[in-house]
Amino acid sequence: MKEYPKPKLVPVPTTNIIPERDIGKSPILECRHLGIDFGGLTAVGDFNMAIGRTEIAGLIGPNGAGKTTVFNLLTKVYQPTRGTILLDGQDTHSMTTAQVSRAGIARTFQNIRLFNKLSVADNVKVGLHNQVEYPLWDGLFRLPRYWRQERVAQERAMELLSIFDMEGVANTPAGSLPYGAQRRLEIVRALATGPSLLLLDEPAAGMNPSETAELMDNIVKIRDTFGIAIMLIEHDMNLVMNICEGICVLNFGQIIAKGTPEEIQADPAVIEAYLGKRKEA
Amino acid sequence: MKGLFGKIHGLKRTTKVDFATYAGVTIAFLAVTALRSGGHLSRSLTGMLVPICCYIAMAVSLNLTVGILGELSLGHAGFMSVGAFSGVIAAQSLQNVIPFAPLRLAVALIIGAIFAGIVGALVGVPVLRLRGDYLAIVTLAFGEIIKELINCLLVGCDSKGLHILFNVKGSLSIADLNMGPEGFAIIKGAQGATGTQTIATFTAGYILVMVTLVVVLNLVRSRAGRAIMALRDNRIAAESVGLNVTKYKMMAFVISAALAGAAGALYGLNYSNLAASKFSFDTSILVLLYVVLGGLGNIWGSVIAAAVLYILPEALREFADYRMLIYAIILILVMLITNNPLLTDFFDQLKKRIAFYLRGFGQKGRAGK
């Protein structure tokens, strides 16, 4: 595994920070003044953030802070009311969810969304849809290219499943997997789309401490082997503080703090958001 | 033989199910052909052979929309109707161009499939972009509209080619087509197609069923089929992995409509007289019933359900007045039994046990080599 130096976050244009080693390369994702209103309610206000090419970034905040809304904005499930999203320097304004996925953002969901009736391997192969291609006719008449590409898809799927040692359950229906395995399968499926940025929405939810520890190792391993950026929403502070290099704290749709784990832990605004204000004597 | 068992064991489970389906249909076809040539089939049953094949193809194609794509279509008979009448027009007008009947039949089936596919695309383009039950509503209306449209249609053919009139006011007749003396009518408005040469055969029906099965099963096991099932299972996740939802919905729906059109063309060429009222809402529901009772997404289930449930009312004829009552009771029983957890558990156990024995067989086969 590649050794990364303890990151020092440095400011980049606008009000963003990314790890020092990713400086010189443009950030993989940059949000400028991103925001969305639902009716009169501002769900996300002025969201500015940059993520380095190989950064593991955390997005934390109390319940209802707008964290998942940010993910939905990034993947264009919602169209932002204002602001721009630059994915690898490219504006995603006119893209659909599917186009954003093809452009390089993959995600998992807070409430698991697998293709329950398909087998585990087929779930991954759906993720490989735009990676291993052949036209409809080749499939209908089973021409040579069908067999060739299906074999490639099968090999790639098994390779990806081996990240989480899931080759053994490749043929079981995804819906019948235990909860933790379903979460891992979602990550594998997201990775299969060949992303440059992986968004994980509460990957450790419902996992016990040993499973969480294993997940932490795996997230770092994924970053190192695929060389991609990962952004995660998580309530497990142990996980966030241990593997995230840059953390962004959201409360009521506004960013209240940004920095390294150490800086965040000491930030008075964060402490207030989570624990409330100390009553003055 | 031992080597064969070993080879079968080495295949994927889905591949095995597919080949069992093909083999089952082929064996049934050969058995019925043998019985028929031996004169063991009653006349009424012989007359039902082609319609059974048509309804099997209809059920399999509807299963693609309802079971695989997960969209409810209540107007599948409409596509059958489009296929039937365009197929009849093609076959009748090509009588002199292609005298060889089986080839003419094949051309008619392909034309029926193309027209039904085009109509399917026209229906699908606006509706499949929407979420929810709109497809059910629109296809329901479509089935009725198509019936009325064909009721207005006057088609004849002479040496100059096809003459088509649209008899909206009901004041026109075949004479208004201005055909030459050698011309003949193909579709006479509300009377439907009359004087059609019945060139449909049971062999053609078998080929139709096999082609339908191959198309649907190969689609399901391919990249496109996985995409279609993925957006059935979870649309939002399917979009998030980069699938073009509308494209794959259209693909499934148009293929389903085209296959229904081919089935309709064969059906139309099995009767010398056929009115559009035959392809009513009842027919759509009947096919949906085959699909639901055979199991959503279960292709061989559709084949068996369509065959058995089509013959059943005929077989119950001796109960005279109580026929439909008993038919209804049987349908309810089938629904209850297939949803009973005790029984499904029992069948699962049985399946496992059979699989266990088969595996033993296969391994012995391999050891023997």
Image: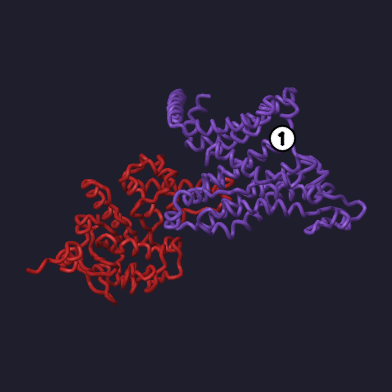
Chain colours: A red, B purple
Location of residue B27 with respect to B64 vertically, above or below: above
Residue lying at 62% horizontally and 31% vertically, measured from the top left: B325
Q: Is residue B327 above or below residue A220?
A: above
Residue B359 appears in the picture as rendered: no
Residue type, label 1: Phe
Q: How many marks?
A: 1
- Using the image, determine if residue A64 lies above or below residue B347: below
Q: Residue furthest front?
A: B321
Residue B125: x percent and y percent? 59, 59
Of residues A132 and B209, the one nearer the viewer is B209
Q: Quadrant of the C terminus of chain A?
A: bottom left
| Tag 1 residue | B202
Left or right of B301: which side holds A281? left
Q: Position of residue A134 (x, y in %)?
A: 52, 53
Q: Horizontally, is B5 left or right of A28 in the view?
A: right
Q: Chain of mark 1?
A: B
Quadrant the N terminus of chain A occupies: bottom left
- Please name whichever residue, B177 or B10, is drawn nearer the observer in this view of the structure: B177
**Residue drawn at 76 percent across, 42 percent down:** B269
- Residue B33 falls in which quadrant of the image? top right
Q: Is residue A119 left or right of residue B332?
A: left
Residue at (53%, 38%) from the top-left corner? Answer: B295
Q: Position of residue A66 (x, y in %)?
A: 31, 64
Q: Few, some or many C-alpha atoms within 10 Å of disc 1 (few <14, some 14-19, many ≥20)? A: many
Q: Secondary structure at mark 1?
A: helix
Q: x%, y% of residue B184?
A: 87, 50
